[in-house]
Amino acid sequence: MFQRCLRVANVQDMFRAQSPLAQAASDPRREREMLQTFSVYVRDRPAVLNRVVSLFRTRAFSVESFTVGHTELPGISRMTIVVDIERERTPLVEANLYKLMDVAFVERVSDTAITQELALIKVPARKELSSLLSGAMAGFHTRIVAQSQDLVVLEVAATPQEIDRLAESLRPDCILEMVRTGPIAMEAERKSTVGPGRLQDQSH
């Protein structure tokens, strides 16, 4: 198990070295305030996801994460898109999104919004890791969702920064596998400006 763990860790190191996300995390010049989060409300129609993704590709916007799911409004989905750009360029992103068919509403998520992410982390079921896992469960909103003789799968729901710290605390003892959803966000201090009236069909 330990040799397998080392091999997996080496593969992960290779991907982290090549990944733009890893380069951003390791470069002190890349501050988190460069990341801008957008909520994009779209109508559930064919090809809308492809159009949004194509926009970011053709405009060379650097996307850090992209999450989409249904909302409380029938026929409307909400995309949460984190983009690595200067704040001064956020109006450009909004303007380009509004040009797309079936994009109903766009807003930049404020710095005071509630931001959470879900991660699943698989680690070896080793006795020497038990105290570390107990600390993770106490300090990072973590619970065990699957367990066998050899493996433990953790679920953590926390801010992206907290998940980063948890991953760093576990990595020296070998994370076998990790998957993250990307962040979702909701404004806590004000009622959403989005409602059925704002999402009426518009001509494009």
Image: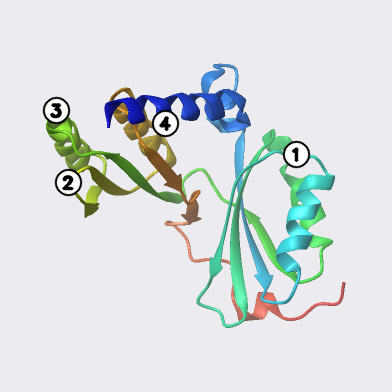
Q: Which residue is mark 1?
A: 89
Give the numbered dot on residue 120: none
| Distance Cα–Cα, label 1 vs label 4 | 39 Å
Residue kind at label 3, given as amino acid type: Glu
Q: Which residue is mark 2?
A: 149
Residue closest to the far top: 28
Q: Which residue is mark 3?
A: 128
Task: Tell me the mark number nearer the camera, choosing from 1 and 3.
Answer: 3
Left or right of residue 21: residue 158? left
Asked whether disc 3 touches disc 2, contact meaning CB atoms under 8 Å apart, the reply is no
N-terminal label among 1 and 3 = 1
Asked whether disc 4 touches disc 3, contact meaning CB atoms under 8 Å apart, the reply is no
Badge 2 local density, few (<14 within 10 Å), some, or many (20+)?
Answer: few
N-terminal label among 4 and 2 = 4
Residue 203 position, x and y percent, is 86, 77
Left or right of residue 73: residue 56? right
Left or right of residue 63: residue 94? right
Under tag 2, what secondary structure? loop
Residue kind at label 2, given as amino acid type: Gln
Residue 42 position, x and y percent, is 68, 69
Q: Which residue is mark 4?
A: 8
Left or right of residue 203: residue 80? left
Badge 4 local density, few (<14 within 10 Å), some, or many (20+)?
Answer: some
Q: Report whether residue 115 is seen.
A: yes
Residue kind at label 4, given as amino acid type: Val
